[in-house]
Amino acid sequence: MASLTDLIFGNELILTNILSFMDFKTMKIIRRVNSDWKRLINRRFIDRVIIPLRISHQPLLRSGPITVYIGSKPFCSFGVNCTDREIGILIGNRLTSYKNFYIQVFPSLMKNFEVAYKVVDKLLAHLWRPSVQVGHNLNLDKLKYQGTDRKKLMISVIKKLNTFQPLEA
């Protein structure tokens, strides 16, 4: 016969309620208790964790590879003129379980406006899902100073950003 403790902590509804009062640090520690707790806690992490996507390239190579980092670790690299299909293959479904992203374009890439916004435009197309939230460090005020092609690119990025829910801190 199961003990009262087993009945309480084995009940997913009760455990989920208890976890809702815990911070990340505590949950990170207690997810080691057993596989059921780990599964529940990992699900909560995925709902709350923000994945930083940092976009960079070699500033000396105008057509050099673009690298997308998750935090400080390289996630994928591709050429400046990479197609949507090629980016889709590189990213695959490796990000589909996450719901919150912060896109940060490195200043070295922001100097090359068109490359930066083309990359972000393609990346947004592959991140879109109904429940995804996206934040960014893009300077969207540059729109009024750009030529027609740049304005079209900027409008495309803005439209895609507007299809996402805003990232809540």
Image: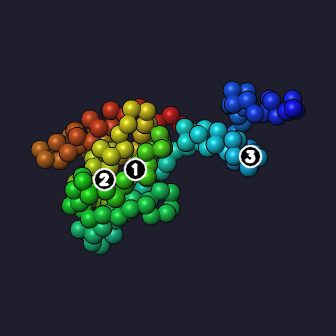
Residue 138 relative to residue 3: left or right: left
Question: Which circle's residue, 3 or 2, is located before the other in the chain?
Answer: 3
Alpha carbons under labels 1 and 3: distance apart: 27 Å
- For the view shown, which residue lies furthest in the bottom direction? 60
Quarter location, residue 101 = top left
Q: Which structural element holds mark 2? A: helix
Mark 3 vs mark 2: give the one in front.
Answer: 3
**Amino acid on which disc 1 is placed:** Asn
> Which quarter of the rendered picture does the C terminus lie within?
top right
Mark 1: few/some/many CA within 10 Å (<14, 14-19, 20+): few
Q: Say which of 25 and 38 sits in front.
A: 38
**Amino acid on which disc 2 is placed:** Gly
Any part of residue 139 in sight: no
Residue 124 vertical position relative to residue 58 in the rendered view, above or below: above
Q: Which residue is mark 1?
A: 93
Residue 111 x %, y %: 29, 59
For image coordinates 24% across by 52% down, the residue present is 84
**Amino acid on which disc 3 is placed:** Asn
Residue 140 relative to residue 104: left or right: left
Q: Which residue is mark 2?
A: 88
> Which quarter of the rendered picture does the N terminus lie within?
top right
Mark 2: few/some/many CA within 10 Å (<14, 14-19, 20+): some
Alpha carbons under labels 3 and 2: distance apart: 36 Å
Mark 1 vs mark 3: give the one in front.
Answer: 3
Residue 7 x %, y %: 80, 30
Question: Which circle's residue, 1 or 3, is located before the other in the chain?
Answer: 3
Residue 96 x %, y %: 43, 45
* Label at residue 146: none
Q: Say which of 137 and 77 sits in front.
A: 77
- For the view shown, which residue lies furthest in the left direction? 148
Residue 15 x %, y %: 72, 32
Q: Which residue is mark 3?
A: 34
